Image (tube, coloured by chain):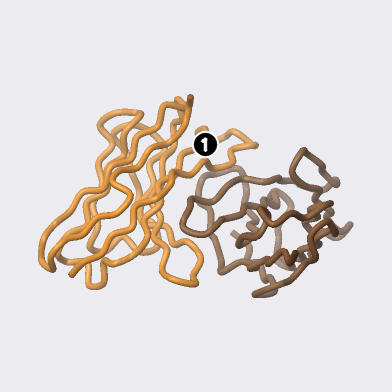
Chain colours: A brown, B orange
Amino acid sequence: DAKTTQPPSMDCAEGRAANLPCNHSTISGNEYVYWYRQIHSQGPQYIIHGLKNNETNEMASLIITEDRKSSTLILPHATLRDTAVYYCIVRASYDKVIFGPGTSLSVIP
Amino acid sequence: DGGITQSPKYLFRKEGQNVTLSCEQNLNHDAMYWYRQDPGQGLRLIYYSQIVNDFQKGDIAEGYSVSREKKESFPLTVTSAQKNPTAFYLCASSTGQGKIYNEQFFGPGTRLTVL
């Protein structure tokens, strides 16, 4: 699995969009980009995934650059409940998943 | 409700004792996983199983053992050989190999403290 790098922490004002970046410069052609988040002392929660195209669901949007070497998770209107650690993972369609330290997002009132 | 259950939420053991952590899922998922998380760190894979009666070592399997006798159950035993067992343990499941959109579903975790 390709390695990812994320900023260790970010702040976002409540109601604003939170844009969380992820670099995955060694991603291979069959690897998907997945995002999970973990609220303190709970299990991680799946958010969204994509391969090449931008994706949107009820939780977030995922923007993947054309060269696929980086991506951005967008939470359109951050709330206090979005305060969590966000993990960016890249993987092919087999089962191992490698979680790095992620980005700790703090949503400020 | 479908999901993954882990019990207990908090577990205390004396040093030198083996302890077994429970993980059960009713999602009909083929694959199950155990991860360990230390404070401020990401998750590290201990063991995973893609099918009943089969499992593979992850990155940090030493001092741990698992079994997969039933599809819905994947218990983890932390043995006395594990040098630093105090950690947060997470179980997860996913649809099987070959499925493209196989995101993992996680349980609530068990916090093990060895005294």
Q: In this view, does A20 lie above or below A30?
A: below
- Tell me, yes or no, if residue B18 can be seen here: yes
* Foreground pick, A91 / A8: A8
Using the rendered view, name the quadrant where residue B31 is placed.
Answer: top left
Q: Residue furthest bottom?
A: A8
User: Residue at 48% of width from left, 52% of height from top?
Assistant: A42
User: Residue at 62% of width from left, 60% of height from top?
Assistant: A84
Residue B19: image x %, image y %?
18, 53
Left or right, residue B112 beside residue A100 = left
- Tell me, yes or no, if residue A71 can be seen here: no
* Foreground pick, B92 / B48: B92
* Foreground pick, A24 / A107: A107
Q: What residue type is labelled 1?
A: Gln
Left or right, residue A42 beside residue A104 = left
Disc 1 element: loop
User: Residue at 42% of width from left, 38% of height from top?
Assistant: B50
- Label 1 resides on the chain identified as B
Residue A90: image x %, image y %?
65, 56
Circle count: 1
> Pointer 1: what residue?
B97
Residue B53: image x %, image y %?
28, 34
Residue B22: image x %, image y %?
28, 42
Q: In which quarter of the image is the C terminus of chain A?
A: bottom right
* Foreground pick, B8 / B106: B8
User: Residue at 39% of width from left, 47% of height from top?
Assistant: B48
Q: Residue furthest left?
A: B16
Q: Which residue lies furthest to the right in this view?
A: A66
Left or right, residue A96 beside residue B67 = right
Q: Residues within 10 Å of mark 1 (few under 14, many from 20)?
A: some
Q: In which quarter of the image is the N terminus of chain A?
A: bottom right
